[in-house]
Image (cartoon, helix red, strand yellow):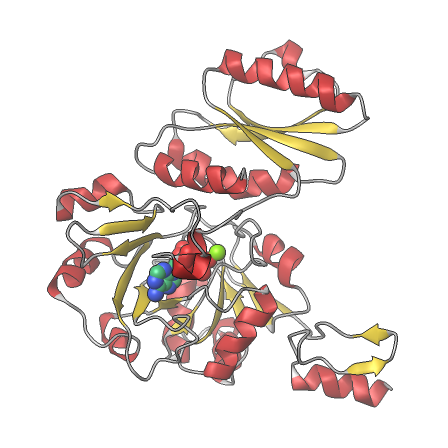
Amino acid sequence: MLEEWRGIVNAHIYGFKTTPRIESSLVILFSVKTVHLKLRAEDAAPGHPAIREVAAILKRGGLVAIPTETVYGLAANALDAAAIGHIFEAKERPSWDPLIVHVANVDMISQAAADFPEKAKKLAEHFWPGPLTLLLKRHPQLPLTVTAGRESVAVRMPAHPVARAVITAAGLPLAAPSANRFGHTSPTTAEHVIADLEGRIDAVLDSGPTQIGVESTVLDPLGTPPLLLRPGGITREQLEDVLGPVEVYSTPAKQAPRALASPGLAGRHYAPQARLLLVEGTPQTFRAAIEQQVATVGENGEYVGAMVPENWLNEQALSCGGLVIFDWGSWSDPAELAHNLFAGLRYLDKPGVRVILCPLPSASGIGLALRDRLLRAAR
Ligand code: TXA
Ligand code: MG
């Protein structure tokens, strides 16, 4: 029995579909020992022992969660179809949802994409390394599972020194979706990754909280006008300064996810277990909504969670029983709100918290990405 168990550990069995039965009543779902490594961003270098260890795991087809400037990503060799399969299994991600390929330099693009047109180059010059993902034509040798069968591939060059050092040390383009289970809130700390993926992946490289806090902007640059598929770290305004008008894609109401321009936009996403209620309006409206929810939910001995901008609640509201508060940051600093958004949703999503109330920021700048994530989480 022990030997058989060890065999399973060594075989790195990730998915329930392929999992053997040890006893008729016991099915092992995931049984990988996840190694926890720590590295400060300022110490990142391809030769650092932690980076070398991670690169070796990736080269032999393993999965490693790494920090990027947006959120933590679950990285694997983009050219290894088996490793890509393991990403989908560990995340329980549907096979129709394609992955972003991460590169450390422009030369690496040729391993993932068939070409790199002028318009994309211009964007790369402005925004790479950084939180912009570009749709390019898929390279015929890139496993089709990376792009979920599509002829386009999403490529980005991250700015985080640790992500860059890992890609450089591995010498491989890395496919990396956000390192959370499918549908969950994206991880902005290694602890978030561990909560979702411990025992399913080979290693987590912890470099502290990510800076931006929401994912990269996904852009199809070649349409006229270019199509913004997912708002993110690079704002619509920044893109329009370089490109002229950009169209923001809106998800059609009754469309199967696999048929969407960007499948990951479908359905309930970034979602806490608790019900998320969004409040558009002033601090007064928000306070009134909190009071109403506390009165209703409190009757059952349950709690109301609230994402509270600085100075939005007075002493009276703050001391009201039945309320769990997350200090979201300054309402006039959307970058701070973005940085704290997913950590706040995860913090408030505790047993006993029935609803989470959150004010909805305006759609300008990074606010467009905040609204997008909140509206999806509240579906
Ligand atoms: O900031 C980020 O982009 C993070 C970090 C780790 O780089 N990654 C990330 O990946 O958010 P993921 O897989 O969670 O989200 C990728 C999004 C999904 O909505 C997916 O459907 C879309 O990009 N996407 C990927 N490839 C695509 C393609 N070929 N065509 C259209 N959409 C694509
Ligand atoms: Mg994701």
Q: Is residue 146 above or below residue 293?
A: below
Is residue 249 found left or right of 297 in the rendered image? left
Residue 118 lies in quadrant: bottom left
- Residue at (75, 40) in percent of width and height: 351
Residue 186: x %, y % from top left = 52, 51
Residue 289: x %, y % from top left = 59, 17
Residue 115 in view here: yes
Residue 80: x %, y % from top left = 45, 83
Q: Quadrant of the N terminus?
A: bottom right
Is residue 61 found left or right of 235 in the rendered image? right
Q: Is residue 338 above or below residue 43?
A: above
Q: Is residue 26 above or below residue 351?
A: below
Q: Which residue is more in the foreground, 107 or 276? A: 276
Ligand 1 lies in quarter: bottom left
Residue 228: x %, y % from top left = 28, 49
How many numbered callouts?
Answer: 0
Residue 63 in view here: no
